[in-house]
Image: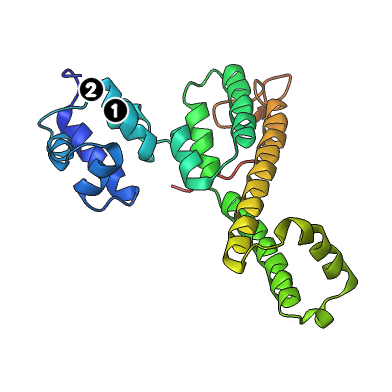
Amino acid sequence: MSTFDKQKFGRRLKEMRLKAGYERQIDLAKKLGTVVQTISNYESGSRLPDAEMLARIVEVLPCNADYLLGFEDKPTYAISFILEQTGLSQKAIEVLFEGIRSAKERKGDKSLESSLVSQFITSDQFSKLVELHEECAGFVLTNEILKYDGSDDDLDDVDRAILRLFEGEMKGIGGKERFDLYIFAAKHQAMELYGEFFKTAINEIDMWIGICDDDGNVIDEIGNIAKRPPEIMPTKKA
């Protein structure tokens, strides 16, 4: 890897380390199972990691190897980082990348796969979906606590029906453990629904791919701009 720009690699490694929340070099070193001097050497530009270490680095930082090595101007998220940070289920990940690969093959854009993942994972829709399901989990938990305290007189028939669904599985599980289970289940459900949303979006996009110019305008049969495609995916403003 001696042919790469060591100084640029060092700057970008430090940038991504801080972005990922590793405030000290030793924090990242521990995560990677190495010593702090190794990270210091990388960031100072005195040396570059070998292929094995580079693979470990991009598993824990919010970027891909091409960005660190200077081949791309903007960082994109590695699958492993998405899984670790969001709890995205394997099924949802498969739905995401199946749609992305389909769109990439049609469009012929090699950067589409990574940029779409980054765009969706950082979108408002993604975070709102997770928050919504966590709120639902909190609602169910509140009802469980009311029931446990013997204060279920305030619950209506629907609430009681919901509680009965959980009664058998939740016997003997304390409040904190219940909360963790509800949040885990809610987050998992959110990710599954997110994968379905992405699949729907890709299906819609497929109708426009191949009939758009470079600016995203739909071209009619005689070469005029007919109309713009629908705003399906969130876009970041410059």
Looking at the picture, which amino acid does disc 1 mark?
Answer: Leu
**Residue under label 1:** 54
Whether 217 is drawn above or below 24: the answer is above
Pick the residue in front: 89 or 218.
89
Write down the residue under mark 2: 50
Q: Are marks 1 and 2 in contact (CB under 8 Å)?
A: yes
Q: Which residue is farthest left?
A: 46
Residue beneath the point at 28% across and 37% down: 32
Q: Of residues 204 and 189, which is closer to you in this image?
A: 189
Q: Position of residue 160 (x, y in %)?
A: 84, 69
> Would you say 25 lies left or right of 118 here?
left
**Which amino acid type corresponds to the residue marked 2 in the rendered image?**
Asp
Q: Is residue 229 left or right of residue 26?
A: right
For image coordinates 83% across by 82% down, the residue present is 153
Can see residue 152? yes
- Residue displayed at 58% across by 45% down: 234
Mark 1 → mark 2, Cα distance in angstroms: 6 Å
Residue 123: horizontal and vertical position, in percent?
Answer: 55, 48
Q: Does the rendering let one see residue 227?
A: no
